[in-house]
Amino acid sequence: MPIADITIIPIGTETPSVSSYVAEIQKVLQQNTDRVNYQLTPMSTLIEGELSDLFDVIQQLHEIPFTNGIQRVATNIRIDDRRDKKSTMAGKLQAVEAKMKSS
Amino acid sequence: MPIADITIIPIGTETPSVSSYVAEIQKVLQQNTDRVNYQLTPMSTLIEGELSDLFDVIQQLHEIPFTNGIQRVATNIRIDDRRDKKSTMAGKLQAVEAKMKSS
Amino acid sequence: MPIADITIIPIGTETPSVSSYVAEIQKVLQQNTDRVNYQLTPMSTLIEGELSDLFDVIQQLHEIPFTNGIQRVATNIRIDDRRDKKSTMAGKLQAVEAKMKSS
Amino acid sequence: MPIADITIIPIGTETPSVSSYVAEIQKVLQQNTDRVNYQLTPMSTLIEGELSDLFDVIQQLHEIPFTNGIQRVATNIRIDDRRDKKSTMAGKLQAVEAKMKSS
């Protein structure tokens, strides 16, 4: 399944802190666990699911700062979509660890 | 209107050239000019349109390498969405040029 | 030569406009034309040069918002580095156009 | 301290797997733990350190695929640099968790 790695930056926030927006993103993701898995990293949010579900959920997340009064949002998305074998967030880490041990 | 800046990288291409995939992306964009404007830069493709149209067109573009036999695609998307004023690709360049002259 | 595609987003700007920061970025680039070529697009700044020059210039650009009182900066960099043949910003566009005509 | 979030994509690999390159990246990072902290996520590698150290280490990592015979590399870097308070990878996650509990 494809995995998306997302940052959503509100522009014009008065203060440099954006953690309240990130917390809201996590809440919207909790409401979508029937169709996507997600994981928060120190730099972004990772979402795993069918491609159409990913795009649909990302569009919801991108709207969050606007509903909180922000007038401009910069969203960055990296999608890794591999179709020759089953790909999961956990599996990708395991593949790297196996390569490190074997070499 | 939001603007998206997209790179679609096919992984496992045997050769380092990806220009044939970029050319196909332009063709699909030509079929969507009723709803999006687009511009090719040396590093990416820019698309301007309603947010739902952008996501729909990006999903079409992301599929192109797969239909050509590629098994893995890395897509990178930057979205700039400003809603306090009309924002266009041309207008953004003009705003920077005006700032450079006035200072 | 490698090409870098850069966005530098100041966080905590009070207003949604960032064009004054982009204008300053262009000025610093004008002072570095002995070692890099650059081009402004509606979504980012492209810089072409030796890899060590690119990293050096990018670090200078990243500092600009801080010298203007901003306390947080989100910089995004895409580097395309091809070494089997001479690669330039102009040449990449021509390769795509040639592919579109021949197909 | 600034944090960088990096993906290094080798282009022209014949197969869709890139985990061997990611494993090599981890090894180079292990040799630089005197000046940077790092963390592997399912989608990228996070590095924390002084800005000049980050750029220096990233340049080393970007070279890895070339030393393995690859002719083209697409590197993507997100830098988050906050200077009004001490920022760490662990601290950023804690800030989000605190916001989620308090709301």
Image: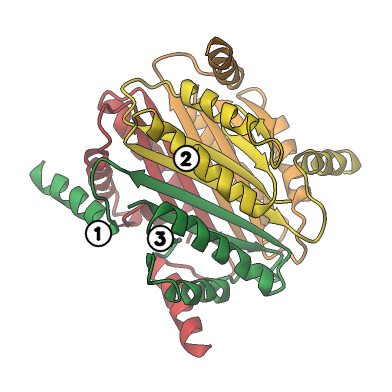
Chain colours: A yellow, B green, C red, D orange
- Where residue D38 appears, as percent x and y from the top left, is 66, 28
Q: Residue at x 67, y 35 (%)?
A: A38
Mark 3–mark 2 contact, CB under 8 Å?
no
Q: Residue at x 70, y 68 (%)?
A: B70
Q: Which of marks 1 and 3 is nearer the N terminus?
A: 3
Judging depth in this view, the residue of C51 and A53 nearest the camera is: A53
Q: In this view, does D47 lie above or below D25?
A: above
Q: Report the amino acid beneath label 1.
A: Ala
- Where residue D1 appears, as percent x and y from the top left, is 50, 21
Chain identity of mark 2: A
Mark 1–mark 2 contact, CB under 8 Å?
no
Judging depth in this view, the residue of C50 and C75 nearest the camera is: C75
Q: Nearer the viewer, mark 3 or mark 2?
A: 2
Residue linked to disc 1: B90
**Do marks 1 and 3 share a chain?**
yes
Q: Which residue is drawn at 50% across and 25% down?
A: D50
Q: Which residue is drawn at 25% across and 52% down?
A: B92
Residue linked to disc 3: B46
Q: Is residue D18 visible?
A: yes
Q: Residue C25's quadrant in the figure?
A: top left
- Where residue C16 appears, as percent x and y from the top left, is 28, 35
- Where residue C34 appears, as percent x and y from the top left, is 30, 54
Chain identity of mark 1: B
